[in-house]
Amino acid sequence: MGLFGTGTRTAKQVEGQAAEDAALAYLQQQGLKLLQRNFRCKGGEIDLILQQQDTLVFVEVRKRADARFGGAAASITASKQARLILAAQVFLQRYRVPPSCRFDVVAFEGTHLSWIKNAIEA
């Protein structure tokens, strides 16, 4: 935790971190290379930023206990998508010529992992 933080994390934060860790390990096994974790800017955050060949892959990780209410992937609302796109635009400002990129979702329902490529259109 930060300098002034208490160091205590909620069960939901611990679960979310574990899901991110599992998603990252899975994607690295598929050959993707981690560039940055938890990229934050004013207005948005991206869980994982990876590279797959010449493509930047912005990844949102979602975890739900099960698929009721549409499941993990369905929990990404239009406003959340807009925040992801905004954060990606900020991240891409570091490139003189932005590479091709896509938005993927790694969704966990219970212990089942789904990797959804091009899940969000920008």
Image (spheres, grey):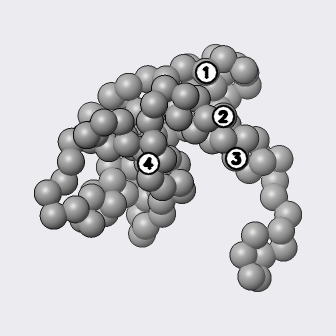
The residue lying at 66 percent from left, 17 percent from top is: 112
Q: Are marks 4 and 3 in contact (CB under 8 Å)?
A: no
Give percent across and percent down for residue 45: 47, 56
Q: Residue 22: which numbered mark, if any?
A: 2
In which quarter of the view is residue 21 placed?
A: top right
Q: Residues within 10 Å of mark 3 (few under 14, many from 20)?
A: some
Q: Nearer the viewer, mark 4 or mark 3?
A: 4
Image quadrant of residue 23? top right
Q: Secondary structure at mark 3?
A: helix
Quarter of the rendering occupied by the C terminus = top left
Residue with the mark numbered 4: 49
Question: Which residue occupies 54% across, 20% down?
Answer: 114
Q: Measure the alpha-carbon separation of dots 4 and 3.
A: 15 Å
Q: Is residue 108 visible?
A: yes
Name the element at disc 1. strand
Residue annotated with mark 1: 113
Q: Considering only order in the chain, which callout, 3 or 4, is on the residue closer to the N terminus?
A: 3
Residue ID at (21%, 48%): 99
Q: Amino acid at mark 2?
A: Ala
State the CA–CA distance, disc 2 to disc 3: 9 Å
Q: Which residue is mark 3?
A: 17
Q: Amino acid at mark 1?
A: Leu
Q: Which circle's residue, 2 or 3, is located before the other in the chain?
A: 3
Query: Is residue 15 shown above or below 111?
Result: below
